[in-house]
Image: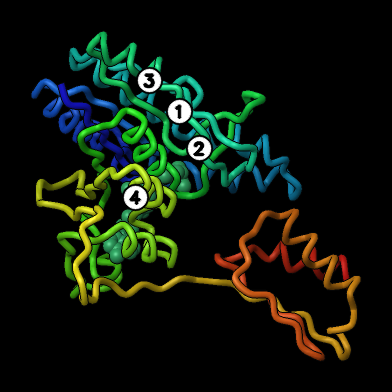
């Protein structure tokens, strides 16, 4: 029997109607005598809403508590999908990240998977259950919940596929593949039939959110082809694998980065200010692309858009 991993993103599980479409897709493959492992994201804008709600409560949220909160979004999705499949007469079981044996390091909100103990998943598959796993989360060595960064459910799917030596890992989304640019922003975007891991990793790292960059790294390491398809049509998707096509131009991507600059004559010699700034960046665990210092300016370019709070914190610390 083949094992197939199917991942459904937030827009694919946003409401009951969409959950039914997802359930039918799962049942189709289950009825063809496959072991089915499903990974789901939080419904619709749930994760965004949980972040805003937490920020209404505090400007100084403990990382551990934020992860406990954010992981709840995916927990709702797994339970709802299992309830629906059971109601349709299929034996589904929901597993949170820790129940699925996903162990991570301690980096809250950007955790890396260390190992997956597949014994529980395998036990449920042996009993012919459809295993529904909460994406985007695991536990660290203290059994505290960690999350993988925005879009991280893709990484759960590919990591689980690698751990189970699955035949296929499908990433179902609101787009039917990887395009030559974001198809929701440019109508003339063309669907790509195939990309190499390397090309996809560049696209994901530069802002094409269709696949989480870590899932591509894991796919490459464990040679898992990643097939992106639409939840809402049956068109062929895009396959990300180790097949390399020479001399092709694949895609154009835009990324919002942030730049914070601190200006003042002689700043290049102000070691204490430079140290304070670097300490804040380390403490906030934000990824830096460049740190430039000149006679009268320090400019820091961040990998992603950073919140105003970071500027305020630097201002408070050094002015
Ligand atoms: P999901 O909720 O299923 O995880 P995401 O929102 O994370 O889906 O990713 C899908 C989105 O990625 C699409 O709706 C699309 O707007 C965006 N996207 C950006 N660049 C690309 C691209 N090159 N090809 C396909 N989709 C892209
Ligand atoms: N729910 C998480 C997010 O919104 C993870 C995911 O969707 O992959 O970022
Ligand atoms: Mg996503």
Q: Which element is circle 2 on? A: strand
| Mark 4 or mark 3: whose residue is earlier in sequence | 3
| Mark 1 or mark 3: whose residue is earlier in sequence | 3
In the image, 138 versus 162, the foreground residue is 162
Give above or below for 3 relative to 128.
below
Q: Name the residue under label 2.
A: 113
Relative horizontal placement of residue 298, taking residue 215 as reference (left or right): right
Q: Which numbered disc, 2 or 4, marks the residue closer to the eye?
A: 4
Q: Mark 1 points at which residue?
A: 116
Q: Which element is circle 1 on? A: strand
Report the quarter where the N terminus lies.
Answer: top left
Give above or below for 299 relative to 151.
below
Q: Please report the residue visible at 40 percent of the width from the left and 16 percent of the height from the top.
A: 119
The CA distance from mark 1 to mark 2 is: 8 Å
The CA distance from mark 2 to mark 3 is: 20 Å
Q: Does any atom of ligand 2 lie closer than 8 Å to the CB of label 1?
A: no
The color scheme shown is rainbow
Q: Mark 4 points at which residue?
A: 220
In the image, 300 versus 17, the foreground residue is 300
Q: Please report the residue visible at 38 percent of the width from the left and 22 percent of the height from the top.
A: 79
Toward the top, the furthest residue is: 127
The CA distance from mark 2 to mark 4 is: 15 Å
The CA distance from mark 4 to mark 3 is: 28 Å
């Amino acid at each position: 029997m083949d094992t197939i991993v199917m991942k459904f993103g937030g827009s694919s599980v946003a409401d009951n109607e969409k959950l039914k479409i997802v359930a039918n897709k799962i049942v189709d493959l289950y009825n063809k005598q496959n072991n089915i492992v499903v990974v789901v994201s939080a419904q619709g804008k749930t994760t965004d809403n949980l972040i805003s709600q937490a920020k209404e409560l505090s400007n100084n949220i403990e990382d551990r508590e934020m992860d406990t909160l954010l992981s709840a979004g995916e927990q709702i999705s797994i339970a709802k999908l299992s309830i629906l499949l059971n109601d349709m007469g299929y034996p589904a079981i929901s597993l949170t990240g820790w129940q699925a044996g996903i162990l991570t390091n301690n980096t809250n909100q950007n955790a890396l998977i260390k190992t997956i103990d597949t014994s529980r998943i395998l036990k449920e598959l042996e009993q012919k259950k459809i295993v529904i796993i909460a994406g985007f989360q695991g536990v660290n060595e203290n059994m505290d919940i960690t999350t993988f960064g925005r879009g991280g459910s893709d990484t759960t799917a590919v990591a689980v596929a690698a751990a189970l030596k699955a035949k296929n890992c499908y990433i179902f989304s609101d787009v039917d593949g990887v395009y030559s640019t974001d198809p929701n922003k440019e109508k003339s975007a063309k669907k790509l039939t195939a990309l190499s891991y390397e090309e996809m990793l560049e696209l994901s790292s530069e802002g094409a959110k269709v696949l989480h960059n870590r899932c591509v790294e894991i796919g490459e390491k464990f040679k898992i082809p990643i097939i992106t398809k639409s939840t809402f049509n049956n068109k062929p998707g895009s396959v990300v694998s180790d097949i390399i096509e020479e001399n092709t131009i694949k895609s154009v991507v835009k990324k919002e980065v942030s730049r914070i600059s601190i200006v003042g004559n002689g700043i290049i010699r102000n070691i204490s200010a430079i140290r304070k700034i670097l300490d804040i960046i380390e403490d906030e665990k934000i990824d830096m692309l460049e740190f430039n210092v000149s006679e009268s300016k320090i400019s820091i370019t961040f990998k992603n858009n950073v919140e105003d709070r970071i500027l305020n914190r630097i201002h408070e610390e050094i002015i």
